[in-house]
Image (cartoon, rainbow, N blue to C red):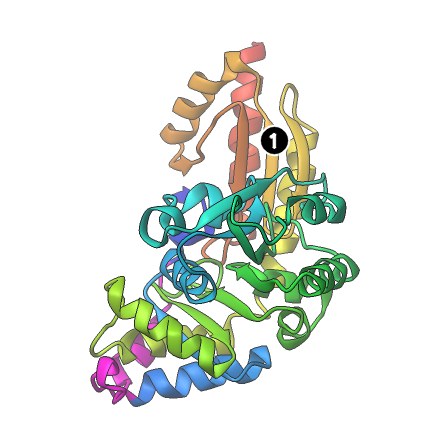
Amino acid sequence: MIDLRSDTVTRPTPAMRDAMHAAPVGDDVWGDDPSVKRFEAAVAKRAGKDTGLLFPSGTQSNLAGLLAHCQRGDEYIAGQQAHTYKYEGGGAAVLGGIQPQPLEHAADGSLPLERIRAAIKPDDFHFARTRLLALENTIGGKVLDADYVKAATDLAREHGLATHLDGARLFNAAVATDTSLSALCAPFDSISLCFSKGLGAPMGSVLVGPRALIDEARRWRKVLGGGLRQSGIIAAACHHALDHHVAELAEDHRRAARLAQGITALPDLKVERQATNMVFLTVPESHIVPLRAWLAEQEILIEVLYATRLVVHRDLDDDAIERVLGALDEYFTRRAA
């Protein structure tokens, strides 16, 4: 089966499973799991931050970060398409009483500085208190421009705002731009880093930042049900990914470019853009149902919609990409016959 729905579908490698099996464990709620402590320290060092905290998921890591930064009645600024606003169940509002202030993205995935500035509320009891700017990198596969990130975070600090980054695919950004993780993390107070997408761990995200903030996030992790026991097994998988899988993201990016190139040569399908490991295309309505069925017959999983996203990941090799292109070509050849 070739699965292009997301890079969350990756499975642990045999070497990762070996690392999980061999991991020394303790009770992480008590702070006794050596594999967790070693992994959190390694991620914090790589990110250039004081400390880190392991979470079961990126959704929980982001939420704990927002809760640590903001109080009830506070507000965070985010993008309309950002995970922290659109794709994480409204957790900040539901569980934290934190109001999101969503802004439209520019074409490059950024939040224009003038929109950020205009969204920051004055210190007046009529308004929610603007406390945090939350960005995402990559966003829809796009890498945020480094100069823009500095300008946006500088603007936030000028107005007394903290800064958080949903860095679920920040390793992709690091590889794509040949930039260190610490340089990409430097402008932000807190960063959520995911290991269960392109890096192939079965679960796990780490929130990194200053010690006082992470201590507050640890309290919220317990409240949110994220305090795990022998989680060194998960930490070992993530640590293996950190040590062995990051550089291989370049292969995902190369294969995504090849996929986009091949689809461009096909009739009717329009490649809107390709960025890092993602390809976005437009599928005419008349093709949506039959193309989805045809690909399923070929054991190719793609969520075929009008606006379709294909995500390349480490479980797909060059042959898989060519097989997808061959199946698409055969579909259109048959339709034309």
- Furthest residue to the right? 147
Say few, some or many: other residues with alpha carbon within 10 Å of mark 1 (under 14 / 14 to 19 / 20 or more). many
Q: Which residue is mark 1?
A: 281
The magenta region covers 11-33
The residue sitting at 61% across, 51% down in the picture is 255
Q: Nearer the viewer, residue 68 or 138?
A: 68
Q: Quadrant of residue 224?
A: bottom left
Helix, strand, or loop for circle 1? strand
Residue 207, percent from left and from top: 45, 70
Q: Nearer the viewer, residue 148 or 334?
A: 148
Specify whether residue 195 is painted magenta.
no
Specify whether residue 13 is painted magenta.
yes
- Is residue 118 in view from this perspective? yes
Residue 165, percent from left and from top: 56, 61
Q: Is residue 306 above or below residue 21?
A: above
Mark 1 residue type: Leu
